[in-house]
Amino acid sequence: MPSHKRNTTHTPPTISTLSNIPYFTHEAIVLHYARAAVTVGLWESERILCDRYFPQDAPLLELGCGAGRIAFGLWENGWRDITATDFSARMIEAAREINRTRRSGIVFSVADATALPFPSEHFTSVIFGFNGLMMIPGATRREQALREMRRVLRPGGTVIFTGHERDLPCRQTHWARERDLWARGLQDPSLEQFGDYNHSTPQGRMFIHASSQEEVRTLAKKCGFFVAETAMRSELASEPLRVRDFSDDTRFWVLRPL
């Protein structure tokens, strides 16, 4: 009888095969993020942590800004030195289109989080919201992005990001099934490590990595950070329906330099 077990030794996925660029340049997705910038705005949980850790008079960098939801919200709440970047040129176009009406002083630009075009120790605050760090395919590239955040961060500065957590009770069934597939060599061969996931949508595939808390703490220390605070969004604030409809619960990580 022929074996149905897949060969577990395969060439690691490349950015060309796992990149989220096609998804985040799809017009329907760009429109979704543009609407969120206007109608969803800054989450209360995001505002709470930014108030707690980000001085309003110091340079702030947002990575994965999409169409500007967080950046515009911070501007409206008093932050004035904001640089917002995204790897999708179409998202940046949408953010700039919105800014023609908002007329904020936010600087929007296209940038790859794994190779930031900014000098070392340039920003006091860095935020990578809405699970953006974990949407970077490849563990080494996520590590490189975090190292870049550490490089551009000033001494005593703060990094905040969010990510899906696979250890939550509501996700145990899915990840137990995935763990069984990986153990039998039947996982999606395009994926690099346990926790990777290809989410299929009508607009195409979106890659995301769901981490464990231990995994994030280990990565943070490896990149020169300690965890100053971590909490689920639902633990930080009771978000309005428009936020809960836009995104499910997620874990916030607040990192400071070692």
Image: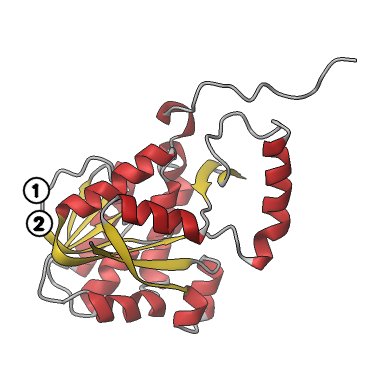
Q: Amino acid at mark 2?
A: His
Disc 1 residue crowd, few under 14, some 14–19, many 20+, Cα 10 Å = few
Q: Secondary structure at mark 1?
A: loop
Q: Point out the image quarter for the C terminus.
A: bottom left
Among the 4 quarters of the image, the one containing residue 31: bottom left
> Disc 1 designates what residue?
119
Q: Point out the image quarter for the N terminus.
A: top right
Residue 8, above or below 236: above
Q: Position of residue 79 (x, y in %)?
A: 17, 74
Q: Amino acid at mark 1?
A: Pro
Disc 2 residue crowd, few under 14, some 14–19, many 20+, Cα 10 Å = some
Q: Position of residue 178 (x, y in %)?
A: 68, 45
**Foreground of the two, 122 or 150:** 150
Residue at the spot 30% in from the left edge and 46% down from the top edge: 145
Q: Are marks 1 and 2 in contact (CB under 8 Å)?
A: yes
**Foreground of the two, 132 or 169:** 169
Among the 4 quarters of the image, the one containing residue 200: top right
Q: Secondary structure at mark 2?
A: loop
Residue at the spot 51% in from the left edge and 43% down from the top edge: 207
Q: Is residue 38 left or right of residue 5?
A: left
Residue 46, above or below 144: below
Residue 115, above or below 50: above
Q: Position of residue 170 (x, y in %)?
A: 67, 66
Residue at the spot 54% in from the left edge and 39% down from the top edge: 193
Q: CA distance from mark 1 to mark 2?
A: 6 Å
Among the 4 quarters of the image, the one containing residue 68: bottom left
> Disc 2 designates what residue?
122
Residue at the spot 10% in from the left edge and 56% down from the top edge: 121
Residue farthest to the right?
1
